[in-house]
Amino acid sequence: MPAHRPVNLALIGAGRIGSFHAESVARRLVDADLVAVADPAPGAAGRLAASLDAPKAYTSVSELLANPEVDGVIIATPARFHTSVVVEAARAGKAVFCEKPMALTLEEADEAIAATKSAGVPLQVGFNRRWDQAFYEGRAAIDAGKVGSVQLLRSLTRDPGPYRGNPEKTPLWTIFYETLIHDFDTLLWLNPTAKPVEVTAIADALVRPDFAGNGFHDTAVVTIRFDNGSIAVAEANFCAMYGYDIRGEVFGSGGMVMMGDVRRSSMTLYDKNGVSNDTWRRDTDHFVNGYTAQLASFVDAIRTGTVTGPTGEDARNALAIALACITSVTERRAIPLSSL
Ligand SMILES: NC(=O)c1ccc[n+]([C@@H]2O[C@H](COP(=O)([O-])OP(=O)(O)OC[C@H]3O[C@@H](n4cnc5c(N)ncnc54)[C@H](O)[C@@H]3O)[C@@H](O)[C@H]2O)c1
């Protein structure tokens, strides 16, 4: 990769988060250019490419991957396509950034990891919370020994309400595969010397109780036991009426770190109604800096050949917990991770 030119990135999957990532590359990264977009939906790639001055648009992923100008791809297709696109991109010699979840089975995860290793290309996964300032500093405090030995951890995702999803079109187990997978990565990353050994999960449809029993879940609580004795709790809900609420907490023998704040800023309004704050309403507002930093890290990985962000193995570890949750909910029991 020559140092004298920006890294050439291409987007695969021009939907909601893909469009935002493409905009990050084109407008917010100083060391990368957006050179192509692919999406099978008629017009989607062309519209996005035109709006960001990207020179090429494709309806075929294979045609994009045959473009020799592309150094790396950002994969933001629906989850069920991630592994096959990772493998195809690796075989084409492209560096890979893949949105979460990288895979839906451990076999797929192994396939994605093996394909990128044998092609010798970097593989980074979209666990953007690691770059959020509060979470980043929390991990630094843990590494510096400031909370002592870790005993309790907590991570939560409450998506902003009102809930506008369609339970009938939501793939089964989305709450674990796509929502809580962020929390599983966060908890593993905040407890770096420990291995998870047992998972217990409860899930229900509390936001849309009319879909309870149809396999739809919008609320879940998970406990994870680690081999150092520490215990973590992750929870998610699809409808927090007060905003997009992402928080973490690590408590240990020496103290505690708390991370995340639903308030947009420290600006607090005092008026006739009392005291109030505005709150985050969208992931792309809350995490704009983290999303940009993770792509800057991917650009560095392309330049240096070394991934410092979340790897394919990290994606596999988070997925193993998601899969254990699914078994735990189905069989109503604790699942030892060694059984997977
Ligand atoms: N890290 C985060 O915070 C975050 C946030 C949102 C979404 N995501 C993840 O990103 C992925 C995409 O989510 P989204 O909300 O943008 O979805 P979306 O449905 O808005 O967009 C998906 C796009 O992919 C296109 N597509 C479908 N099949 C394709 C294929 N085989 N090849 C190329 N493109 C294809 C669709 O036409 C669509 O434009 C999901 O895995 C989701 O979990 C991550």
Image: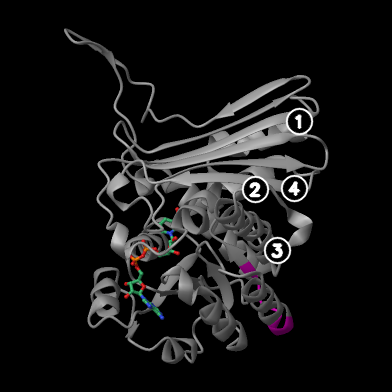
Horizontal side, residue 137 vs residue 162: left or right: right
Q: Residues within 10 Å of mark 3 (few under 14, many from 20)?
A: some
Query: What segment carries the magenta color?
Result: 118-123
Q: Label 3 sits on what residue type?
A: Glu
Mark 1 to mark 4 CA distance (whole Å)? 13 Å
| Residue with the mark numbered 4 | 196
**Camera-side mark, 1 or 4:** 4
What label sits on residue 313 in the rendered view? Answer: 3
Please provide percent x and percent y for residue 16. 32, 62
Horizontal side, residue 130 vs residue 313: left or right: left
Does the rendering let one see residue 309?
A: no
- Lower sequence index among marks 2 and 3: 3
Q: Secondary structure at mark 3?
A: helix
The correct choice, above or below, for 266 with respect to 163 in the image is above
Q: Pointers 3 and 1 in contact (CB under 8 A)?
A: no
Q: Label 2 sits on what residue type?
A: Arg
Mark 2 to mark 4 CA distance (whole Å)? 16 Å
| Residue with the mark numbered 2 | 333
The correct choice, above or below, for 332 with respect to 21 in the image is above
Quadrant location of residue 108?
A: bottom right
- Lower sequence index among marks 2 and 4: 4
Residue positioned most to the left? 272
The correct choice, above or below, for 110 with respect to 127 in the image is below
Mark 2 to mark 3 CA distance (whole Å)? 26 Å
| Residue with the mark numbered 1 | 150
